[in-house]
Image (spheres, rainbow, N blue to C red):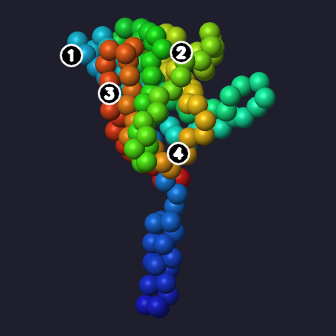
């Protein structure tokens, strides 16, 4: 019985340890009076590489901004993402030509709403090579994103 219990415990432990983990990056931004109050998340596991004859190869990665209730409208004017790769190379997303939708770089998020956004990077980005990430707000403020992981 003791051997059976030990075997079950070890199998459960190994199964728990071997679960895949999803890494993401986030930050919160708020003013003392909470008129600016949002959470920004960047999700490399959503990366998608696109290669076609009509566009140069690129990688798109999803982000989301949750504007808290009670805050003012959040207005994005071509905010940027910078990524430090483990190789030491620093890359930045480029401005898309989209005027609406998830790839548009200018948008407004009302209080209590969430906006999903895709940031595009030239070429192929290996998500396992991402070391650190920064969110650049209208070229005036830079926020280093914190790292977190969730078990799948």
Residue 127 is labelled as 4
Foreground pick, 1 / 32: 32
Mark before the other along the chain sequence, 3 or 4? 4
Number of residues whose C-alpha sits closer than 10 Å to that of mark 4, classed few (under 14), some (14–19) or many (20 or more): some
Between disc 1 and disc 4, the foreground one is 4
Dot 2 falls on a residue whose secondary structure is loop
Q: Which residue is mark 2?
A: 105
Whole-Å distance between the Cαs marked 1 and 3? 17 Å
Q: In which image quadrant can residue 133 be found?
A: top left
Number of residues whose C-alpha sits closer than 10 Å to that of mark 3, classed few (under 14), some (14–19) or many (20 or more): some
Whole-Å distance between the Cαs marked 1 and 2? 27 Å
**Could you tell me how many numbered marks the image carries?**
4
Q: Which residue is mark 1?
A: 32
Between disc 1 and disc 3, the foreground one is 3
Q: Is residue 150 visible?
A: yes
Mark before the other along the chain sequence, 4 or 2? 2
Between disc 1 and disc 2, the foreground one is 2
Number of residues whose C-alpha sits closer than 10 Å to that of mark 2, classed few (under 14), some (14–19) or many (20 or more): many
Mark before the other along the chain sequence, 1 or 2? 1
Residue 143 is labelled as 3
Whole-Å distance between the Cαs marked 1 and 4? 35 Å
Q: Residue at x 38, y 31 (%)?
A: 134
Foreground pick, 59 / 71: 59
Q: Are marks 1 and 2 in contact (CB under 8 Å)?
A: no
Dot 4 falls on a residue whose secondary structure is helix
Q: Residue at x 62, y 13 (%)?
A: 97
Q: Are marks 3 and 4 in contact (CB under 8 Å)?
A: no
Looking at the image, residue 69 sits to the left or right of residue 123; the answer is: left
Rendering coords of residue 101 (x, y %): 63, 16
């Amino acid at each position: 019985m003791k051997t059976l219990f030990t075997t079950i415990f070890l199998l459960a432990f190994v199964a728990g340890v071997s679960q895949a983990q999803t890494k993401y990056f986030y930050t919160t931004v708020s003013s003392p009076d909470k008129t600016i109050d949002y959470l920004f998340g960047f999700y490399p596991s959503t990366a998608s590489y696109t290669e076609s004859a009509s566009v140069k190869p690129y990688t798109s990665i999803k982000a989301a901004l949750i504007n808290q209730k009670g805050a003012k409208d959040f207005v994005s004017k071509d905010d940027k993402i910078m990524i430090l790769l483990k190789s030491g190379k620093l890359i930045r997303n480029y401005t898309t030509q989209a005027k609406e939708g998830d790839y548009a770089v200018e948008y407004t998020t009302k209080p209590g709403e969430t906006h999903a956004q895709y940031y595009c990077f030239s070429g192929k980005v290996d998500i396992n090579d991402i070391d650190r990430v920064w969110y650049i707000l209208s070229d005036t403020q830079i926020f280093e994103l914190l790292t977190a992981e969730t078990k799948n």
